[in-house]
Every structure is written in structure tokens, then in C-alpha cells.
Amino acid sequence: MPLFITSLNSGSNGNCYYVGTDRDAVLIDAGISCLQTEQRMKRLGLSLDAVRAIFVSHEHSDHISGLVRLAGKYRLPVYITPRTLLHSGLPTNELAVRPLRAYEPVQLGDLRITAFPKLHDATDPHSFLVAGPDANVGVFTDIDMPCEHVIHHFRQCHAAFLETNYDDELLEKGRYPVYLKRRIQSEHGHLSNAQALALFRTHKPDFMSHLVLSHVSKDNNCPQLIQDLFMPHRGETEVVVASRWEETAVFRVGEKRLAELSNS
């Protein structure tokens, strides 16, 4: 059974990622409005009726700004760590909150979702591995460096959303004040193009079919620059740069694994 994935939006203006089978799905973060989420999923032929829950990576507004409305309208449980909830400002009386803890998998229909810690300037930030019957999808954004947690899970992925936030040269020459540049480059900031490429080249499993490069800075990066950087190293992996203004296509993940099983 394949997984279907799409980035509904990716960037400092809002983040929301969809992973699901043809029966069950989850959203990772809800940083765009309920209306935008509905419209983009409708254009892609996806139904919110299949969504079983929303998982929150951390409390920054570009990851939770649409959460209350979306979760309330569709009566979706929200998985969030207690510390993130405490610092999020979210109205707990309006949400069906479920506790999220590192390395304690959550089973929702066909999907098994595991959160694990990441390095970022938030209270209790987590990344995710979403496992279906025949494929694994990782969501690795808002991280500064590929720590052991990220590397361990990246090696298991048939597909991944991987941050490529900034280009080193564009950031250094850009208009941001020095303190903000250093925050972005700090061990709790964001992942650069070069860091993401090094992770991909060193730890990509042979069975990875899709890589969605995500959370691209409007001022300190360029989609074409990212594409040109990764293309020579992609092998058989389809590499896509997610937009900060619109949804990507829906990608079907797990076909190669299914073919291997049927031929064995």
C-alpha cells in the first residue's frame, strides 16, 4: 500500500505537510489558514475526511496559525508535546489535545507516526517519521544540523521533506542584520543547502524515491539554485523544491518496494 504526500505550503509564511494512504492521512503542522488548506487539498483531489489528526512540530506561528480553526471544524485531534502546548498560546479548551512524546509511536489506521527531538530555537521541537504498510516518510524541517536522530530516521525513508532554508553566500551578502544571520546559522537555527546536500549524499538509502526540499527562504535562497545543486546527485530519486506560495503535486511513494515484494 503506497503513501501519498504533498507539501500544501512550506516556508516562513506557513507550513503544512500531508502524508496518507488512500484510507488514512495526517497533517504535519497547520501553518496556513483552514480555507487555504481546504482549497489546496481540493485542487489535489485529497479529502480532509481522510485526515485522522494534526501533529505539531513546534510552537512557532508559521506552524500553528491555522490549527485552531482547522482542528475545530473537522474535529481533529491535535498531537503536541506538553511543553510545546504550554508555550504555544493555543486555547486548550477549544482543542482535542493528545500528548506527543518522543519515540512513542501513534497508530492511526494505516499510519504509525513517531516523533523524535530536533535542534531548533523552540521549546520542545520534534521531527516525524510517518510509516505506512510499505513505505516511510520523514519530515525534517526547521533543523540546523543533521543530528543523530535525523540521520537515523533519514536512512529509513522512502521519501522525505528536507529543509533547504538558505544558501550560505546569499545569507552572508543579504540584508538581514548580523544577529539574525547568526541565529539562522546557529545550532538551533535552520539547515543550509550545503548541509542538506551532505545529508542526502551521505545517508540517502537506495530505495528513496522522492525528496521534497522545503522551508526555502524568500530572501536567502533561490529554488533554481537548490535544484541545480541537487540534480547531479539525485540518482533515481525525484527531487522537488516545495513552494512557499502553493501546493506541490501529490507524489505516490512506495511503488518500488511493492514491485520488489511482488517479484520476490
Image (spheres, grey):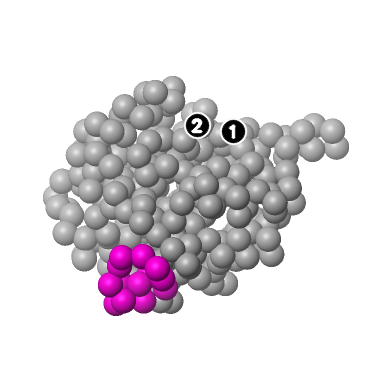
180 magenta-colored: yes
- Tell me, yes or no, whether the two marked residues, 2 and 1, touch with CB atoms within 8 Å: no
Say what amino acid the circle numbered 2 marks: Ala
Q: Secondary structure at mark 2?
A: loop
Q: Is residue 256 left or right of residue 247?
A: right
Q: Which residues are magenta?
A: 172-185
Q: Position of residue 4 (x, y in %)?
A: 53, 34
| SS class, disc 1 | strand
- Kindly identify which numbered label has been placed on residue 249: 2
Which residue is drawn at the image coordinates 46% and 51% (left, top)? 222
Q: Which residue is mark 1?
A: 252
How packed mark 1 is, by other alpha carbons closer than 10 Å (few <14, some 14-19, many 20 or more), is: some
Label 2, residues with CA under 10 Å away: few <14, some 14-19, many ≥20: some
Q: Which residue does the image show at 21% across and 65% down from the upper left?
A: 86
The x, y position of residue 135, in whole percent, is 63, 43
Q: Tell me, yes or no, whether the highlighted magenta stretch contains residue 193.
A: no
Asked if residue 89 is positioned above or below residue 260 in the image, the reply reads below
Identify which amino acid the numbered label 1 is placed on: Arg
